[in-house]
Every structure is written in structure tokens, then in C-alpha cells.
Image: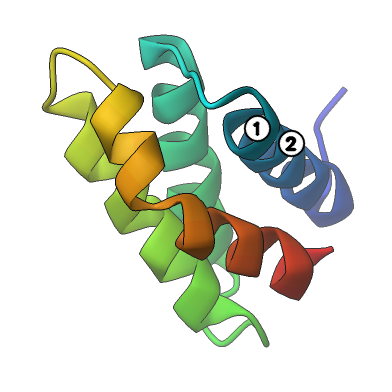
């Protein structure tokens, strides 16, 4: 069963909410965020929240190059809260 756009957006939101609330993340979560935002933007480049999705995509791409994520989440805490509010 293929996931639709609403499910992809739900996945993105769930991961971001976890990052915001727990302050921790895993490599696989960043990889999921990266893939989901990339696919979303490839399929709907003019989505009403394209700018936010690009920012989330960049956030996840940066994290995938890191060894630890605590500082990355801490430094993006306000961004994450804003993204959740915008997409939610």
C-alpha cells in the first residue's frame, strides 16, 4: 500500500514532534525526514509549505553528516517548533 501525501506529512510531523519533545533523534529518523521531504518536494514542488519542507530537508541533510545530534536538535529547537506549528 502506497502512502499518500497526508501520510507523508503525518510522518514528517511525528518525527519533528518527537525531536522537539524528547530532544533526541536517531540516524534513521533523519534519513526518513530526508526521504519524505525530498519525495514530497519532488512530487509537489509548489506545495503551500514548500519553504518549510525545504528547511526540514536541509535540517535532516545536515544531521546525516554528524556523529551526534543533541546540539543539532538544541540549536534548531525553535525551528522545529515553528515547523510543527506550520505543518500541523
Residue 42 in sight here = no
* Residue nearer the viewer, 33 or 46: 33
Provide the secondary structure element on which disc 1 rests.
Answer: helix
Total marks shown come to 2
| Residue at 85% from the left image edge and 42% from the top image edge | 7
| Residue at 31% from the left image edge and 49% from the top image edge | 75
* Residue nearer the viewer, 84 or 9: 84
| Image spot of residue 82 (x, y percent) | 62, 69
**How many C-alpha atoms fall within 10 Å of the one at disc 2: few (<14), some, or many (≥20)?**
some
Provide the secondary structure element on which disc 2 rests.
Answer: helix
Contact between marks 2 and 1 (CB within 8 A): the answer is yes
Query: What colour scheme does the image use?
Result: rainbow
Which residue carries the number 2 mark? 11
| Image spot of residue 86 (x, y percent) | 72, 74
Q: CA distance from mark 2 to mark 1?
A: 6 Å
Could you tell whether 40 is left or right of 13 in the image? left
**How many C-alpha atoms fall within 10 Å of the one at disc 1: few (<14), some, or many (≥20)?**
some
Which residue carries the number 1 mark? 15
| Image quadrant where one finds the N terminus | top right
Residue 78, compared with residue 23, is above or below; it is below
| Image spot of residue 88 (x, y percent) | 84, 63
Residue 59, compared with residue 53, is above or below; it is above
Residue 55, compared with residue 62, is above or below; it is below
| Image spot of residue 22 (x, y percent) | 63, 23
Residue 21 in sight here = yes
Q: Quadrant of residue 15?
A: top right
Amino acid at each position: 500500500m502506497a502512502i499518500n501525501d497526508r501520510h507523508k506529512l503525518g510522518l514528517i510531523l511525528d518525527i519533528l514532534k518527537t525531536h522537539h519533545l524528547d530532544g533526541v533523534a536517531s540516524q534513521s529518523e533523519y534519513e526518513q525526514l530526508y526521504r519524505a521531504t525530498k519525495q514530497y518536494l519532488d512530487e509537489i514542488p509548489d506545495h503551500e509549505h514548500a519553504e518549510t519542507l525545504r528547511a526540514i530537508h536541509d535540517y535532516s541533510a545536515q544531521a546525516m553528516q554528524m556523529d551526534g545530534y543533541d546540539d543539532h536538535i538544541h540549536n534548531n529547537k525553535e525551528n522545529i517548533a515553528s515547523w510543527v506549528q506550520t505543518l500541523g
